Amino acid sequence: MKKTLVAAVLLGLSFLCVPALFAQLTPAELAQQAQWEDFLKTADVVGQKQLSGEEAVTNPWVMTLKKGDFTHRGLWKNAQGRQKGYIEGWEYEIAAYRIDRLVGLNMIAPTIERRFQGDLGSCQYWIDDTMSLRDREKQKIKMPSYKVFNWNRATYLQRFFDNLIANEDRSQGNILITKDWRMILIDHSRSFRTWKKLIYTERHPEGPKLMSELPRAIVEKAKALTFESIKAVVGNYLTDDEIKSVLVRRDLILTEIDKLIKRNGEQNVLY
């Protein structure tokens, strides 16, 4: 077990170094998904701290987990029902992670179901050495010019995903930035509304926010989504109506992409 976890740590370090073509988690990190999920499920809780305040409105817990000689943190939450004007669901955290993998987005850290203090909730792998987009803006940290192109493409992916899962609570606080300027998405407990509309379009309240460029592979995977394929990965974490709404929004996304292609040319929209 010790050797296995050491190997996982070494591969996990490459997560901070090796960019993938468009995925924000590296191939080496993705290869460890099953192992990290098992760690989150089975490691002992050796420390715990509840978060609160403006940036932790669902009062999640940071758990220190240990298995063998390896220790790492996980974020546990069990937000449920209406809280502070929003419908919350910890199950949506797991569904978002699984759909992220299904479409090949790879922007969400491993997230599993775990019981803590007698309650069920979601537990997500804590990614170290990141800052939020909000902190970056507050501290006026300038992005290196050679990172802007890939960051913009990551932003289009974020819009695509939030449109797909109807995430009504994307903010600068739940977009994380790694040391090498990759984007990691967290906090999806306010997603999977049964809306038949998109959030990011030309008519966004803050101005046009388009999915201007997208990987062809992800668009093809979105086209291939079916009720059965989504149900197979999300299980009972989503209701049938929530799954059907994902497919309605998928169709709306494809319509938006077709409009962009007609306007800008396929070679400028899909890569």
Image (cartoon, grey):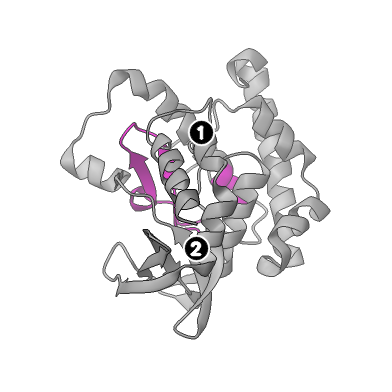
Q: What amino acid type is highlighted by mark number 1? A: Tyr
Rendered image quadrant of residue 125: bottom left
Between discs 1 and 2, the one toward the N terminus? 2
**Mark 1 or 2, closer to the camera:** 2
Q: Nearer the viewer, residue 6 or 170?
A: 6
> Magenta segment range?
161-190
Query: Horizontal and vertical percent for residue 45?
Result: 40, 73
The type of residue carrying mark 2 is Leu
In the rendering, at what x and y percent does residue 119 appear? 51, 82
Q: Is 188 situated above or below 239?
A: above
Q: What residue is shown at x 33% (from left), y 52% (from top)?
A: 173
Q: Please give the label number shown on residue 40.
A: 2
| Circle 1 SS class | helix
Which quarter of the rendering shows the C terminus? Answer: top right
**Mark 1–mark 2 distance (CA, rounded to whole Å):** 30 Å
Q: Is residue 186 magenta?
A: yes
Q: Residue at x 71, y 69 (%)?
A: 236
Please tell me which residue is depicted at 82% across the width and 54% down the height of the picture.
228
Q: Position of residue 261 (x, y in %)?
A: 66, 21
User: Vertically, is 160 above or below 96?
Assistant: above
**Residue 92 shows up from this direction:** yes
Q: Which mark is residue 4?
A: none
Magenta stretch contains residue 220: no
Secondary structure beneath label 2: helix
Q: Which residue is mark 1?
A: 156
- Furthest toward the bottom, the residue is 118
Quadrant in the picture for residue 106: top right
Q: Are marks 1 and 2 in contact (CB under 8 Å)?
A: no
Mark 2 residue crowding within 10 angstroms, few (<14) / some (14–19) / many (20+): many
Q: Judge by depth and name the residue closer to the eye, 153 or 117.
A: 117
Is residue 244 something one can see in this rendering? no
Nearer to us in this view, 200 or 124: 124
